[in-house]
Amino acid sequence: MILNIVLISLFGAIGVLLRFGANSLFYSQVYIFLPTLLVNALGSLLIGILYAAHNEGFLFIPQSFYLPLMVGLLGGLTTFSGFSLETLKLINSGAVGLAALNITLQIVVSLGLCSLGMKAVTFFH
């Protein structure tokens, strides 16, 4: 258990550094969203590959690295990959309505609270 926590933390730090690197390399005033799009796309691709490989029984990495990669590396890189996986799992299980609710809530709540936070700062400033 302790080793798992250490590995998840280590891989999470690597994911965060990769996200920081993408922001540093690809940021521009014109395409401000490009670094986020890149890490979300890459993270979603990788989580799909790892999840399917694990479920199909041909995981090409040791089992002890599955959670550190999924939760640590990809969680540090982007939480959008987890959102993508959860939404597709709902769709694949036939819970399309829940998937739509998940998509709607994630976007509306996240954008709404981000906006609220921004307004709170300007209000109290």
Image: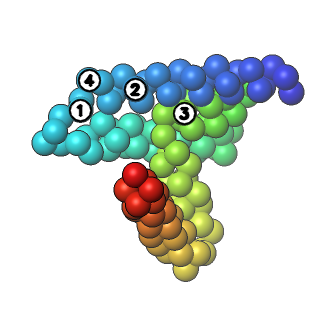
Q: Which amino acid does label 3 sit on?
A: Gly
Q: What count of labels does the image hold?
A: 4
Task: Judge depth for marks 3 and 1 and give the one in front.
Answer: 1
- Residue underneath mark 1: 27
Q: Which amino acid does label 4 sit on?
A: Leu
Classify 10 Å Cα crowding around label 1: few (below 14), some (14-19), many (20 and above).
some
Residue at 53% of width from left, 75% of height from top? 101
**Closer to the camera, 49 or 83?**
83
Classify 10 Å Cα crowding around label 4: few (below 14), some (14-19), many (20 and above).
few
Residue 98 image position (x, y, % from top left): 58, 75
**Furthest residue in direction left, as rendered:** 30
Q: Which amino acid does label 1 sit on?
A: Tyr
Whether 61 is drawn above or below 112: the answer is: above
- Residue underneath mark 2: 20
- Give the Cα distance between marks 2 and 1: 10 Å
Q: Do the residues labelled 4 and 1 touch (CB within 8 Å)?
A: yes
Q: Are marks 2 and 3 in contact (CB under 8 Å)?
A: no
Residue at 24% of width from left, 29% of height from top? 26
- Residue underneath mark 4: 25
Classify 10 Å Cα crowding around label 2: few (below 14), some (14-19), many (20 and above).
some
Whether 33 is drawn above or below 124: the answer is: above
Q: What residue type is labelled 2?
A: Phe
Helix, strand or loop at label 4? It is helix
- Residue underneath mark 3: 76
